[in-house]
């Protein structure tokens, strides 16, 4: 009999295979759509269709209990998922036998109530564990009066006193409570803190008539507008502005960037606490900010690039690690870069500069000193003075300055400390030169799904918003971005055609954020002046893309 972990891994592999078949058909159809042909030919062409053997989302709701060589026993918390698998058993058999072996004869599905108890009782069990792990004053202030109010689709909603308490709980103990709850229920679940509709129900009554102690007093902030109360513009994802350059130069697709943002947010708290960047990450933690469905997420994993056992997603920023045989968790393991790789263009340019200087040396020691001096000079210079030069880019271009130096100087193993330090200085100088990008949680988690924006549309909005012009004379941010080349340039940044972008400009969900205009002069700026936000382009007659707040 195989272990549960092995059987679960086989079940997941089967789902990935089905996703792969779906993607193959989609890719073939997409290739045909891009093939030049007349409208009449296109109308006659019969695109392939694919019907999976069962609903993939329902398959993901299954947990493998055991497999004895003949019978596969599954369990789930969802009646509809159980009916789906039972009703499509015959269609699933070929896929099941591919991964479990030809001896498989039967499949049984048991519906298990994830919790037979009420949400209040479930959360009480979590609080019983927290009370022994937290300082008494902190527990009394933040946790004691919280209540479980609902439990649906693997998420336990916990009512808290106010928005300030929710923020504290999310930043300090959300990951801990999620782990405790998962251990109690023996399955992957999530805790979601919500502000109670009736705060009076959660007030901690003072039965002895004594005033509360000072350490238990909570100051409740109040938003001045409904917009701020709903959107919380201070709740943001912060990225290096250089990340947008990866999109503009085609080193990452919008979907890859979304996936990386999802992973960054999933590890944010653990990384902030100095626990490293390797951990088990359930898919739902990534999906919260990646703007993609569960099936889309696993299709991205299916398409991971790499050689042998080493696989990468998110444009090389996330490494999929081998399964941990000692872990009881079904979550995949990843190594996540928390800072961006350099673009291939920028790496090729740096390498060409170093190579030109090395060519003037006669010995290995001279070459090393030349590289050290050149790196030092680059670290001191403003990247805007040199980084946008044209250069030929090789397909095998290293993405780290250390790797380039190692290759140019034929150094095996680690770089000497002085070279490694200068490489880091150049990297920091380049990436810090582009500032920071701020994206509200509300935009990623509410606006994009509600309006059904694509990844390309979402990142077009984010990029244009970041490029909005800042008027230093008045100290105000304007609602327009001047882009040389207009629509064709923005389309290239996000990897779509100008025709597609023009099509978006006919859709109200996109024009709620972006519209175009032709302007003779920039308000608040004399004609002919230079604006750093628009990369030094002159203020003349230009097509201007506007961000509409």
Image (tube, rainbow, N blue to C red):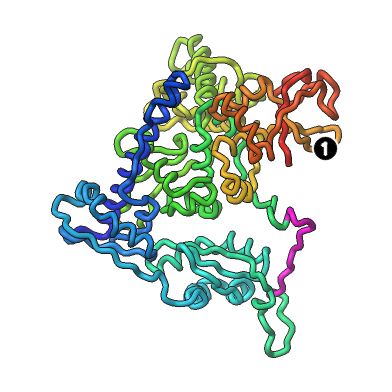
Q: Is residue 277 left or right of residue 222?
A: left
Q: Quadrant of the N terminus?
A: bottom left
Is residue 220 shown in magenta? yes
Position of 277 relative to 35 (above/below): below
Is residue 285 shown in magenta? no
Q: Which residue range is magenta in the image?
A: 215-228
**Picture coordinates of residue 207 (x, y %)?**
68, 88
Q: Secondary structure at mark 1?
A: loop
Which residue in the rendered view is the most extreme toward the bottom? 208
Q: Is residue 375 left or right of residue 405?
A: right
Magenta portion: prevailing SS class: loop
Using the image as rendered, state which of residue 518 and residue 417 is in the foreground.
Answer: 518
Q: Quadrant of the C terminus?
A: top right
Residue where numbered disc 1 is placed: 475
Which residue is pictured at 41% across the width and 76% down the height?
A: 116
Q: How many residues crowd around disc 1 within 10 Å: few (fewer than 14), some, or many (20 or more)? A: few
Quadrant of the rendered image containing residue 409: top left
**Picture coordinates of residue 233 (x, y %)?**
70, 50
Using the image as rendered, state which of residue 226 and residue 503 is in the foreground.
Answer: 503
């Amino acid at each position: 009999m195989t272990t549960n972990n092995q059987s679960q891994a086989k079940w997941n592999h089967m789902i990935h295979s089905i996703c792969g078949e779906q993607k193959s058909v989609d890719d073939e159809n997409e290739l045909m759509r891009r093939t030049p042909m007349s409208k009449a030919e296109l109308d006659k062409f019969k695109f392939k269709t694919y019907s999976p053997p069962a609903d993939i989302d329902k398959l993901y709701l299954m947990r493998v209990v055991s497999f004895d060589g003949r019978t596969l026993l599954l369990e789930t918390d969802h009646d509809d998922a159980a009916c789906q698998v039972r009703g499509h058993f015959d269609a699933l058999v070929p896929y099941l036998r591919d991964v479990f072996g030809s001896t498989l004869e039967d499949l049984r599905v048991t519906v298990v109530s994830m919790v037979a108890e009420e949400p209040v009782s479930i959360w009480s069990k979590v609080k019983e564990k927290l009370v022994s792990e937290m300082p008494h004053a902190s527990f009394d202030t933040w946790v004691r009066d919280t209540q479980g109010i609902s439990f649906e689709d693997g998420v336990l909603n916990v009512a808290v006193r106010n928005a300030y308490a929710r923020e504290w709980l999310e930043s300090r103990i959300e990951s801990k409570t999620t782990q405790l709850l998962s251990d109690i229920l023996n399955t992957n679940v999530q805790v979601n803190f919500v502000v109670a509709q009736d705060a009076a129900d959660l007030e901690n009554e003072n039965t002895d008539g004594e005033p509360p102690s000072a350490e238990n007093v909570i100051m409740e902030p109040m938003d001045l507008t409904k917009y701020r109360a709903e959107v919380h513009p201070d709740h943001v994802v912060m990225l290096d502005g250089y990340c947008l350059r990866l999109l503009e130069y085609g080193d990452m697709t919008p979907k890859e960037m979304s996936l990386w943002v999802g992973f960054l947010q999933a590890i944010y708290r653990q990384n902030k606490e100095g626990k490293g960047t390797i951990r088990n990450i359930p898919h739902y933690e990534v999906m919260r900010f990646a703007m993609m469905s569960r099936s889309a997420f696993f299709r991205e994993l299916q398409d991971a690039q790499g050689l042998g056992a080493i696989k990468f997603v998110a444009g090389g920023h996330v490494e999929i690690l081998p399964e941990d045989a000692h872990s009881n968790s079904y979550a995949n393991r990843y190594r996540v870069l928390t800072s961006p790789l350099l673009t291939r263009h920028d790496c090729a340019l740096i390498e060409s500069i170093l190579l030109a200087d090395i060519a003037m040396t006669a010995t290995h020691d001279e070459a090393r000193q030349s590289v050290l001096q050149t790196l030092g000079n680059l670290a001191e210079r403003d990247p805007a003075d040199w980084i946008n030069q044209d250069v030929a880019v090789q397909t095998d271009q290293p993405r780290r300055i250390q790797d380039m130096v190692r290759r140019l100087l034929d150094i095996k193993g680690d770089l000497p400390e002085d070279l490694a330090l200068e490489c880091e200085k150049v990297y920091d100088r380049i990436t810090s030169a582009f500032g920071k990008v701020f994206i509200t949680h509300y935009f990623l988690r509410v606006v994009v799904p509600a309006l059904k924006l694509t990844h390309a549309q979402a990142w077009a909005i984010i990029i244009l918003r970041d490029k909005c012009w800042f008027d230093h004379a008045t100290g105000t941010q304007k609602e327009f971005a001047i882009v040389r080349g207009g629509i064709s340039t923005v389309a290239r940044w996000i990897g779509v055609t100008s025709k597609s972008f023009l099509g978006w400009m006919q859709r109200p969900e996109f024009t709620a954020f972006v519209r175009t205009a032709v302007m003779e002069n920039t308000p608040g700026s004399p004609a002919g002046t230079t604006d750093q936000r628009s990369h030094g382009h002159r203020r003349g007659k230009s097509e201007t893309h506007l961000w509409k707040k």
